Amino acid sequence: MSAVTYAATDLPGVQVQRQTSSGRIAMTLALAGIVAVAAMPWWASTGTIRSILILCCYIAVAQMWNLLAGYAGLVSVGQQAFMGAAGYALFVMAQTFGINPFLAVFLSLLVPAVLAVPLYLLLHRLDGPYFSIGTWVVAEVFRLVCSNLPIVNAGAGMSLRVMKDYSAFERNVAMSLLCAFMLLLTVGGSYWLLRSRYGLALIAMRDNPVAAASQGVNVAKLRFLIYVASAVGCGLAGAIYFMAQLRITPGSAFDPMWANVAIFIVMVGGIGSIEGVLIGALIFFIADRWFGAYGATYFVVLGLMTLLVALYARTGIWGLISKRWDAPWFPIRRKLVDPNRP
């Protein structure tokens, strides 16, 4: 990083380019999309708001998994543990202790953040598939604990009855604003992180963690921070999703489906890219709406699609697109350009 900066400042006329025309267009569209999500109560029906909320949760969870697996090299199949933990924390604070449910959404993020620290200290000793299995075991332990914990009504689950104190319009406004905030935090936050100096370290760690460590990158610290950040992002998605559902049970809170959805979205769209997450989430959302009624057959088709992409197009759909057109939506590379050269 210092070498690039030195070259850019010492060569006359040479500049460091960090943005592209496609990136400016995509940024404008992304900001417009976030504003549209925040303003949903004034242009969308309640059913449309619920559908877009689910799509936003898909994007958030997949981007957190993408950050975890695509850059930190930590393949987790148990991120639903943090979604369920935050969801239950929200219900307990709002329903049992009378805290404002919309404030409880943010307070509930403390639970996955606190849980992620000792869990990572335990799980980071595992490597490869053992780490993945360990994350799944943790999620199952959380499910079993909640199934026998009186404060969360054990296996019977909880209902968020306090939401009846708010009108349908007020709930829609709150859900829309929370969705916009979730997208800003997970997608926008990831983009900001990848464009920072820590992003350079993450890219180096993704490409070769051993070489990155030899150049002074603190791989262990970065992996820990990404794991905690991913836990908080998944917790936010879980809190918002279950608030919209108005009910939570151990089976739904710690459903492994969320891990399957995140893996499908990232693998099909393109691992290690924000663009791939958006493409994969849109594909899964449309497929789920159109073909979800086919049950097991539908999941088999999605599984085969993921396998084919992993075998024959490892960079996903966005990888195939970027090979043909160099027009990133969220550019994170730095290029040295001479504006005087035609």
Image: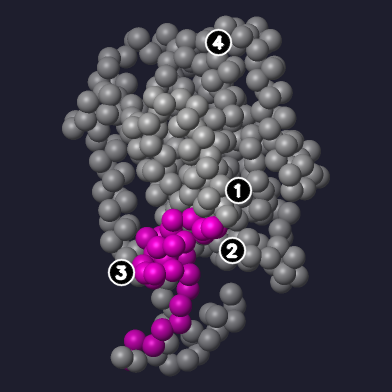
Which quadrant holds the N terminus? bottom right
- CA gap, disc 2 and disc 4: 42 Å
- CA gap, disc 3 and disc 1: 29 Å
- Which residue is drawn at the image coordinates 27% and 17% (left, top)? 168
Say if the magenta span includes residue 336. Answer: yes
Q: Amino acid at mark 3?
A: Ser
Q: Which residue is mark 2?
A: 203
Query: Mark 4 vs mark 1: which is more N-terminal?
Result: 1
Q: What range of the chain is rendered magenta?
A: 312-340
Q: Which residue is mark 1?
A: 68
- Residue 296, image x and y in percent? 50, 27
Disc 2 + disc 4, Cβ < 8 Å? no
- CA gap, disc 2 and disc 1: 12 Å
- CA gap, disc 3 and disc 2: 23 Å
Q: Quadrant of residue 255?
A: top right
Q: Is residue 25 left or right of residue 196?
A: left
Q: Which residue is mark 3?
A: 21
In the rendering, which numbered label is found on residue 157? 4
- Which residue is drawn at the image coordinates 50% and 33% (left, top)? 299
Query: Mark 2 vs mark 1: which is more N-terminal?
Result: 1
- Residue 230, image x and y in percent? 58, 42
Say if the magenta span includes residue 323. Answer: yes
Disc 4 + disc 1, Cβ < 8 Å? no
- CA gap, disc 4 and disc 1: 30 Å
- Residue 169, image x and y in percent? 25, 20
Query: Mark 2 vs mark 4: which is more N-terminal?
Result: 4
- Disc 1 crowd, CA 10 A, few/some/many (<14, 14-19, 20+): many
In front here: 39 or 298?
Answer: 298
Give SS at disc 2: helix
